[in-house]
Amino acid sequence: MSQHMDKPYNDHHRKSAYQDSVNYLYGLQKHGIKLGLENPRRLMDVLGNPQKNFSSIHIAGTNGKGSTSAMLAAILMECGFKVGLYTSPHLVSFTERIKINGLPISESDVVDLTGYIRKLMSERAPDLLPTFFEFVTAMAFYYFSVNKIDWAIVEVGMGGRLDATNVIIPQVSVITNSDYDHKEFLGDTIREIATEEAGIIKPAIPVVTAAAQADSIETIKAIAERQGSPVYFYGKDFSGSITSLDSMHIEFDYYGFKNYSGLILPLTGRHQLYNATVAIMACELLMQKGLPIHEKNIRMGLKTLRCEGRLEWASKEPDIILDGAHNPPAADALAESIKEIFPEKSIILIVGIMKDKDIDGILRPLSSISDKIILTRPKGERAATTERLKKSLKGYAGDIKTTDTVPEALKLAQTLYKEGSLIVVTGSFYTTGEVKEVLGQSGLSSQLSRLRE
């Protein structure tokens, strides 16, 4: 199986087969979220343990996993390696979750792999009932293996210790940070959450983290010591400082085993400094292991990075920014970034949040940056109702409007937009993904024109 497989059937048949495959995968969600490694290990055995056929970097953490993963993939690609990238969730298309050298898996390969894995399961493990994430993780690892990648950047789905991705033995483990999210699965305290995330630490494998809270630092340190794994902390073993920040990029200096000045990252927000320095430290550890990574690779990898859904400009005139902030720390970071970068802008917020998230904690910082909030509901049963969102805004003095769908929210924001406004879409990657889908259907300008009608 390759990234570009020619198929003998027509486009309609191919599209139908792809939709059937994706429907099957989403149907696995009926098995819910099952944290545990029994199913993933059995799946890997069924497939011949494809995860053993490539080197990897494993990335856990409450926030910043996607950005850090994208940075590492970009740097390793600049070195000339063939790099697989496995992330979640997707914004528009399922195929975004599995990429090789920046190219999403083809729809025809999704069809082939879904059928192939189902067939092997029925023959070798008919009693196996994987969840959606377990199946897709197996698909990603098998796809990487048959395409003979050099490196896989693997983002944890949730937690780490019992996550389906935790069947790999990486060259470096990364824990971006530990904060409150997925409490029903990971625990109510920072120590409990950090314990789950630090579950990706393998014996003698180095760990890089930007964890900042004392309980998180102590937990990661203790688990790393038990595993005999060296751990490198932001602020102690490596650090960085921003020298320039605007609405499109940050420029920063890095201090680690080596020092690099004037690095440019086409993402904005002070929090991206932590993600970028963690990525560089991970690269420095690979360099210590003999990997040929040079300063020019780091510079170009970061400079040419494209990372969707993170303070991402979706449009100019009207000015629209997308950010998938879906927990309180991410919402805090977004609010601070908007205040710092766009102090003169009148903010129109479009917010849609999943009902299993800390809605109060997300809306509290966001409500402080806008006097116009449009509450909406993205597709799917997990989405919170606008009535539920509105309850968290009691005492909010600004203007609250509600819409039943994300496209309606975007249309309403267009009517409120005037010179000096900025539309910020946030609360969930599902919400930002729907906006991207709407804006991308028939070209940005024509779609915005239609929305104004």
Image (cartoon, rainbow, N blue to C red):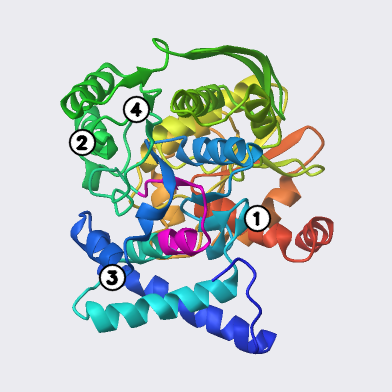
Q: Residues within 10 Å of mark 2 (few under 14, many from 20)?
A: few
Q: Which residue is mark 3?
A: 46
The Cα–Cα distance between marks 2 and 3, rounded to whole angstroms, is: 36 Å
Is residue 389 on the magenta stretch? no
Q: Which residue is mark 4?
A: 207
Q: Would residue 415 be seen by someone viewing this image from the given angle?
A: yes
Observer-side mark, 4 or 2, equals: 4
Residue 338: where, in percent of width, then height?
62, 27
Q: Residue at x 63, y 51 (%)?
A: 102
Q: Which residue is mark 1?
A: 436
The image shows a total of numbered marks equal to 4
Q: Which residue is mark 2?
A: 188
Q: Earlier in the sequence, mark 2 or mark 3?
A: 3
Q: Earlier in the sequence, mark 4 or mark 2?
A: 2
Q: Check contact, mark 4 vs mark 3: CB within 8 A.
A: no
- Label 3 secondary element: helix
What residue range appears in magenta? Answer: 140-157
Report the quarter where the N terminus lies. Answer: bottom right
